[in-house]
Image: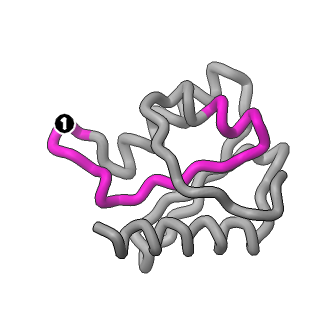
Amino acid sequence: MADEIGSPHRVHTAQDVVGTLLRGNWAIFAHEWADPDGIDPEHWRDVVEAAAEAAGVDVEFVVIPRRSLTVVFNRAAPPTFEQVRASIEVIERARGRN
C-alpha cells in the first residue's frame, strides 16, 4: 500500500468497491452521498457485503458516526489506523470544498 493517500474518487458499483478491496485498498462511504433511491449507509453496506461475499472477500465495516462515514476493508489486507485517518482527512478536506 502506498504511504500517501491520493485524492478521493468515487466508485459506482459494489463490484468496483470489491475490486478496490481486492487491490489492498479500502473504501469510505460518506453518508451525505445517500439519496432518495435508497442508497443510504445501511443499504450500501448490504449491497457491498453481498458483492464481497459473492467474490469470496471477507470484509469489515467500521461506522464513524461523528464523521458520518462508513469504512470498509478487506480483512486479509487491513489498512493501518494512520492510513484510515489520512483518508478521513482527505474526505474532510474535499467536503470543505463543497
Q: Position of residue 78 (x, y in %)?
A: 79, 54
Is 22 magenta? The answer is: yes
Compared with 79, 92 (above or below) is below
The span picked out in magenta is: 18-38
Q: What element carries label 1?
A: loop
Query: Residue 96, image x and y in percent?
Result: 36, 75
Q: Is residue 94 left or right of residue 51?
A: left
Residue at the image position 65 percent from the left and 74 percent from the top = 85
> How far across and down, in percent of the image, does residue 57 sit?
72, 32
**Image quadrant in which you'd find residue 95:** bottom left
Type of the residue with mark 1:
Asp
- The residue that appears at 45% across and 38% down in the rendered structure is 46
Q: Which colour scheme is used?
A: one colour
Q: Name the residue under label 1.
A: 37
Vertical placement of 73 versus 38: above or below?
Answer: below
Q: Is residue 37 magenta?
A: yes
- For the point 68% across and 61% down, which residue is it? 5
Q: Residue furthest left?
A: 36
Quadrant location of the C terminus in the rendered image: bottom left
Which residue shows up at 64% across the image and 27% down it? Answer: 53
In the image, is 31 to the left or to the right of 70? left
